[in-house]
């Protein structure tokens, strides 16, 4: 097994080819072992709903994206089994949504990841909990680094 030396850069490279991430303009800000931070600068023409706020589906997609990256940060290929998002506030069609995640449970077949979504002023937008199925492994990414 060949282990990569820069895990964060390797994961960013894997996700850089995601057409969905590129469509939503999702950016990976930071990756560490067991967690990640992603952000989505709000594009009024792409992310807003009829009420001129950011569409909940765009925010949920951002949150689900960070969960996959977080799984990869501990060497796991994960798929969403359960996804719960509690919307607390919204953005007015401008600004940046930021999601910070952390693995809370890493079992043999499932993983629980929790995250908080904020704006640039650290106002809480949403609290997210997911249960992820471990579908495979990134053999080149160690479980701890």
Image (cartoon, grey):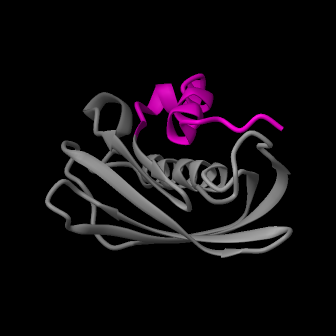
Residue shown at the point (33%, 53%) measured from the top left: 98
**Res 121 quadrant in image:** bottom left
Res 85 visible: no
Residue shown at the point (81%, 59%) measured from the top left: 134
Left or right for 69, reference 58? right
- Give percent across and percent down for residue 72: 65, 49
**Res 48 quadrant in image:** top left
The answer to whether residue 109 is above or below residue 65 is below
Q: Quadrant of the N terminus?
A: top right
* Magenta residue check for 127: no
* Magenta residue check for 4: yes
Left or right for 12, reference 47? right
Instruction: Give whichever of 10, 67 is nearer the camera.
Output: 10
The answer to whether residue 78 is above or below residue 115 is above
Left or right for 87, reference 65? left
Instruction: Give whichever of 103, 32 is nearer the camera.
Output: 32
Query: Which stretch did the figure color magenta?
Result: 1-28
Left or right for 145, reference 44? right
**Res 113 quadrant in image:** bottom right
- Give percent across and percent down for residue 123: 20, 67
The answer to whether residue 22 is above or below residue 58 is above
Residue shown at the point (36%, 39%) measured from the top left: 47
Q: Quadrant of the C terminus?
A: bottom right
Res 95 visible: yes
- Give percent across and percent down for residue 51: 28, 50
- Give percent across and percent down for residue 75: 71, 51
């Amino acid at each position: 097994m060949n282990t990569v030396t820069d895990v964060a850069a390797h994961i960013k490279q894997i996700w850089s080819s995601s057409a969905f991430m590129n469509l939503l303009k999702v950016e990976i800000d930071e990756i560490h072992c067991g967690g990640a931070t992603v952000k989505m600068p709000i594009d009024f023409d792409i992310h807003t709903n009829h009420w001129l706020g950011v569409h909940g589906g765009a925010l949920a997609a951002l949150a689900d994206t960070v969960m996959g990256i977080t799984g990869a940060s501990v060497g796991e290929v994960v798929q969403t089994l359960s996804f719960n998002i509690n919307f607390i506030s919204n953005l007015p069609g401008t600004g940046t949504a930021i999601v910070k995640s952390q693995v809370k449970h890493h079992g043999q077949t499932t993983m629980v990841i929790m995250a908080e979504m904020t704006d640039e002023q650290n106002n809480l937008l949403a609290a997210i909990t997911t249960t992820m199925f471990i579908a495979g492994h990134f053999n080149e990414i160690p479980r701890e680094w």
